[in-house]
Image (cartoon, coloured by chain):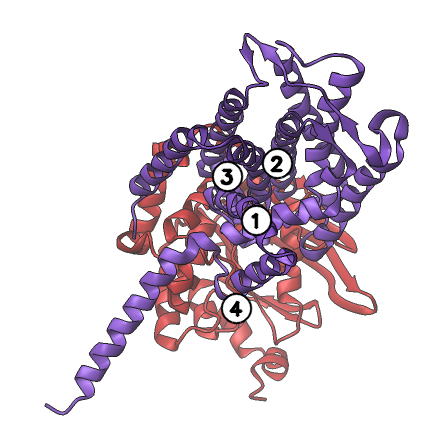
Chain colours: A purple, B red
Amino acid sequence: MVSQQVKIGMVIIGLALLAFVIPQSGSFVILLATRALAFAILAMSVDLLLGFTGLSSMGQAAYFGVGAYLTAVLATKFGIGMGWDFWLVVVMGILLGAALAAVFGLFAIRASGVYFLMITLALGQCVWGLAYRWNSVTGGDNGINMTGRPNFGIDLTNDVNFFYLVYAFFVVSLLLLYILVRSPFGKSLAGIRERELRMQILGYNTWLHKYIAFIIAGGFGGLAGVLWAQTNGHVSPENVVLTTSVDALLMVVLGGSGTLVGAAIGTGIVFGLREFLSTIVPWWQYVLGAVYVLTILYLPMGLMGIPAWIRQRRSQRKSEESKKLASKPS
Amino acid sequence: MSTETHISDGTPVLELRGLCKSFGGLQATRNVTLRIMPGDRKAVIGPNGAGKTTLFNLITGIYPVTSGQVLLFGQDVTSWPSHKRTSLGMARTFQITHLFPKLSILDNVLLAIQGLRKSKFVMWRFQSSYRDVYEKAYGLLDQAGFLDRKDTEVRNLSHGEQRQLEIVLGLASDPKILLLDEPAAGLSSGESVEMAKFLMKLDPALAILLIEHDMDVVFDVASEISVLHFGEILETGTPQQIHSSAKVQEIYLGTG
């Protein structure tokens, strides 16, 4: 077993490399990495529900969407959020995502398993419908185009500066979620994932614990949306559509659920593969689909499960060899 | 131990008044009335399908009752959810092992201890910083002989060990009444003797209500036995009385 300290060390080295290497690359790579980091916050919020609480949310794009639309509407209609008040928009985005999750959670948390999945899917689609039809505010199918990025002493129109900002948000989110899942509250979520009935008998109000986790995930979703809107300068119903929720879910499964870092790695790989494959083959979606299917079939623990899988194979081979040796006549 | 002295102690730990439960047309529990005083060791026996586990699910609040009352420490908890009943000082184990299979033994016990503490909502501090919770967990694991294997995942334990851990989790919240749903289910005869010894060693102030199939465990542990048949209490008495009752022999022991 790799000890926890070594794992943390590896993550820190990885993050440091990212901060060092990305700004040296071309502007395309910088923008791609920025988008991936913003989306990774959403993926980690999905992992909090899927990997740590055992709730497969199919509507996480809703909180992402309200964060993104809030940013775009405030910036274009009210001119808010292009200076120091950008931080205000960040706080508002988190609160709005959390508030929406608090409302949706009242409906969704009563259900579990596939019913939870269906309800979150339906609620997510309600938000998509709103984004698509509420022309006067959301711009309907066209979405909203934003001009420029905030400037508060640090000019965020500079892609490198903006990368560092999103990077900082990502690292802080990862840290907060890491502390959360290792706290007594986080452990209670794992207990609910494993055996909810027992948790109730042990004195936990499991509904409340799941509800709080759902709201926290919504807050992180809102934050990811704010950053996403500023990264792309464009917000459209596509950000809120079911596919975005499914993407986030699949990225978590690909990277390895219940690990947080896996969610981020999954996001990075999918964003990278998408850009890379789409320049090579027109049917790149099939390749991505095949990657998902193969992961789920052969690596149920995701990419983060590879070290454990190799270790298991090795110990199996060793025991087989020793059996062979033992059965050989001496 | 005479029951008279207990009654003078005041309120019963657990009292059931005319408890009934129907699933559609099936009456699983019929007019069950039961009083358990502090330190009582009572057992409910009955053939398969007599409604023993249903009775437990009514007491712990997993199913809503159709009619009747459940009182814990004199308080009417009939409409309370499970977790609130637990916080009054009630704990239970399950007939089918209900542990957290993919968590370590230590994590299982930590969750059980944390269940009644306010710190279960703390999300800005590592679990590992709660020294007192850990010390208590180590104490419980040491008693049960699990300390050297505290990091083993529970799914890798033998069935008998999992049954013991069930009870350890039940004790972690310092309950005043412990409901045991067939603690010896699926154990070999040697293991169930161990289990009976383990149960008899528990704090004498702890009230225990036991559902059991294994007659040896029941006759060793319980001082009073009630016989449940088609959801109804047929007879209540000391182990000797129950053992020699013709009616019980007929429906339950089947030796006629």
Q: CA distance from mark 3 to mark 1?
A: 22 Å
What chain does badge 1 belong to?
A
Task: Label 2, secondary structure: give it.
Answer: helix
What chain does badge 3 belong to?
A
Few, some or many residues within 10 Å of mark 3 (<14, 14–19, 20+): many
Few, some or many residues within 10 Å of mark 1 (<14, 14–19, 20+): many
Q: CA distance from mark 4 to mark 2?
A: 44 Å
Q: Are marks 4 and 3 in contact (CB under 8 Å)?
A: no
Q: Earlier in the sequence, mark 2 or mark 1?
A: 2
Kind of residue at disc 3: Gly
Which residue has dot 1 on it? A251
Few, some or many residues within 10 Å of mark 2 (<14, 14–19, 20+): many
**Side (left or right) of A171 relative to A86:** left
Which residue has dot 2 on it? A217
Question: In this picture, is A321 found above or below B169?
Answer: below
Q: Position of residue B124 (x, y in %)?
A: 47, 28
Q: CA distance from mark 3 to mark 2?
A: 13 Å
Kind of residue at disc 4: Glu
Q: Earlier in the sequence, mark 3 or mark 2?
A: 3
Q: Are marks 1 and 4 in contact (CB under 8 Å)?
A: no
Closer to the camera, B43 or B151? B151
| Numbered circle sitting on residue B212 | 4
Q: Position of residue A76 (x, y in %)?
A: 77, 18
